[in-house]
Image (spheres, helix red, strand yellow):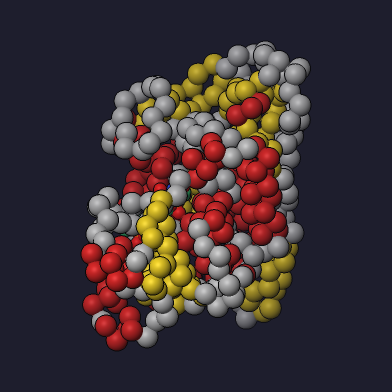
């Protein structure tokens, strides 16, 4: 439950929002309505909606799932475009991340039961669909008392932030992290985990008309400094900032060259995304005189190289941070599955300030909208 106090017509009011999980009655899985693609290309052109039958009886090791909510992440868009490392056999259902309720289990399934909430444990699961029948080994159970928005977005972005903050350097209180794409879902998680540990953050966003709004949003999450890419033209602004021990780059291009100005000697710069679609520009002087360490991170690889137990431990750590209210979910815009083209277009626009989340039915949409209102007022 989330209690929120606000003013209505000058009067102080308070309201309690129910953030408890959806509890569906037993459902059936005769068919699934899915967003698929049978060729790689422009998502606006190649994605289509289809309804297809599902097997009525379950093999012993299979589960039946009812998806509740699935985000539209940059890797989903890149996968459809055919420029992502993961290329599923076509035709494929789109979507790498999402949360589903278990609505049926085969006779040999031990890891989940009906009513559990689960997330995919494999890449390219195909989460943009209402139902699925899949091997129980392809899913992981998560706690069902998370808000739906957090459950739908827990698997990729906060886990990536968590790994990059803990695996590449040993940060101490007061140490500094610099990141670009700081208003992304990963960036928001980085800010919150860092603030919780008393690590300072320098957060670089793209210059924008509503800059003050974004700066306030990130400051409210615990950002120490928020600057724009345009500030790198002003030496005085940059000179006032502390130098960072760790850099996190999801933009590429000139943004990397800018970031090296804020890295201290022997700092590590981890690249995990390339939103600008430009090759990284690394100044030779920064390499030689600062002796910087450049490396990359991909959660998909980490998941493949580590055991299920280690992955569950990471998820439990992130879920604990969510429950302790260290981590708020990213700002989102919920969209019904049938309006997937609107969501996909918005996700590619830039400067929207919100992640698109597909609600897989009207009930999930209502729940997500209620959570969005509660978070806005909390
Ligand atoms: N390697 C991994 O394991 C891993 C894991 C998770 C995420 N990622 C990557 O991390 C990045 C962020 O993902 P997310 O889901 O957190 O993002 P998101 O919430 O969907 O936000 C997108 C971010 O990209 C920025 N952006 C969009 N177009 C851009 C452009 N042309 N140049 C510079 N910035 C641009 C947006 O800034 P504006 O507001 O200015 O548009 C926003 O900060 C993506 O590249 C994603 O693929 C990688």
* Quadrant of residue 228 within the rendered picture: bottom left
The quarter in which the N terminus is drawn is: bottom right
Q: Residue at image x 74%, y 34%?
A: 115
Q: Position of residue 96 (x, y in %)?
A: 49, 37
Vertically, is 46 above or below 297? above
Could you say which is closer to the camera, residue 268 or residue 230?
268
Q: Residue at image x 57%, y 17%?
A: 54
The quarter in which the C terminus is drawn is: bottom right
Compared across the picture, whether 269 is left or right of 171 comes to left
Vertically, is 64 above or below 157? above
Q: Position of residue 300 (x, y in %)?
A: 49, 40
Q: Residue at image x 47%, y 61%?
A: 187
Query: In this orientation, does residue 117 appear?
Result: no
State ligand 1's quadrant.
Answer: bottom left
Q: Residue at image x 61%, y 70%?
A: 197
Say how many tags the image has: 0
Could you say which is closer to the camera, residue 163 or residue 169?
169
Q: Position of residue 313 (x, y in %)?
A: 68, 47
Query: In this orientation, does residue 188 appear?
Result: yes
* Quadrant of residue 133 within the rendered picture: top right
Vertically, is 244 above or below 234? above
Q: Position of residue 181 (x, y in %)?
A: 39, 61
Could you say which is closer to the camera, residue 276 or residue 80?
276
């Amino acid at each position: 439950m989330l209690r929120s106090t606000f003013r209505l017509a000058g009067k102080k009011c308070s309201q309690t929002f129910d953030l408890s999980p959806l509890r569906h009655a037993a459902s059936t899985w005769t068919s699934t309505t899915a967003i698929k693609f049978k060729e790689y290309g422009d998502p606006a052109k190649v994605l289509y909606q289809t309804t297809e039958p599902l097997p009525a009886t379950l093999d012993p090791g299979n589960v039946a799932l009812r998806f509740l909510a699935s985000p539209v992440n940059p890797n989903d868009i890149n996968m459809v475009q055919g420029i992502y490392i993961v290329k599923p056999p076509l035709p494929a259902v789109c979507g790498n991340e999402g949360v589903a309720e278990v609505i049926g289990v085969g006779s040999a399934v031990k890891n989940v039961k009906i009513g559990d909430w689960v997330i995919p444990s494999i890449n390219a699961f195909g989460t943009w669909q209402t139902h699925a029948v899949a091997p129980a080994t392809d899913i992981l159970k998560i706690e069902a008392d998370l808000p739906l928005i957090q459950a739908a977005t827990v698997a990729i972005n906060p886990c990536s932030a968590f790994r990059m903050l803990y695996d590449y350097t040993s940060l101490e209180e007061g140490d500094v992290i610099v990141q670009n794409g700081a208003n992304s879902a990963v960036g928001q998680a980085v800010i919150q985990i860092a603030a919780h540990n008393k690590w300072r953050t320098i957060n670089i966003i793209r210059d924008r008309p509503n800059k003050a709004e974004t700066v306030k949003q990130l400051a409210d999450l615990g950002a120490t400094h928020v600057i724009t890419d345009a500030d790198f033209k002003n030496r005085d602004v940059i000179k006032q900032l502390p130098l960072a021990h760790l850099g996190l780059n999801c933009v590429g291009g000139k943004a990397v060259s800018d970031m090296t100005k804020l890295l201290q000697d022997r700092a590590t710069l981890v690249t995990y995304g390339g939103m600008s679609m430009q090759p990284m520009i690394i100044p030779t002087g920064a390499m030689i005189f600062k002796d910087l360490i450049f490396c990359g991170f991909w959660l998909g690889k980490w998941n493949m190289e580590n055991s299920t137990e280690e992955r569950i431990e990471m998820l439990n750590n992130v879920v604990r941070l969510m429950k302790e209210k260290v981590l708020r979910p990213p700002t989102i815009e919920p969209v019904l599955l049938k309006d997937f083209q609107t969501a996909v277009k918005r996700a590619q626009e830039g400067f929207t300030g919100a992640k698109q989340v597909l609600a897989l039915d009207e009930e999930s949409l209502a729940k997500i909208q209620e959570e969005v209102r509660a978070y806005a007022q909390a």
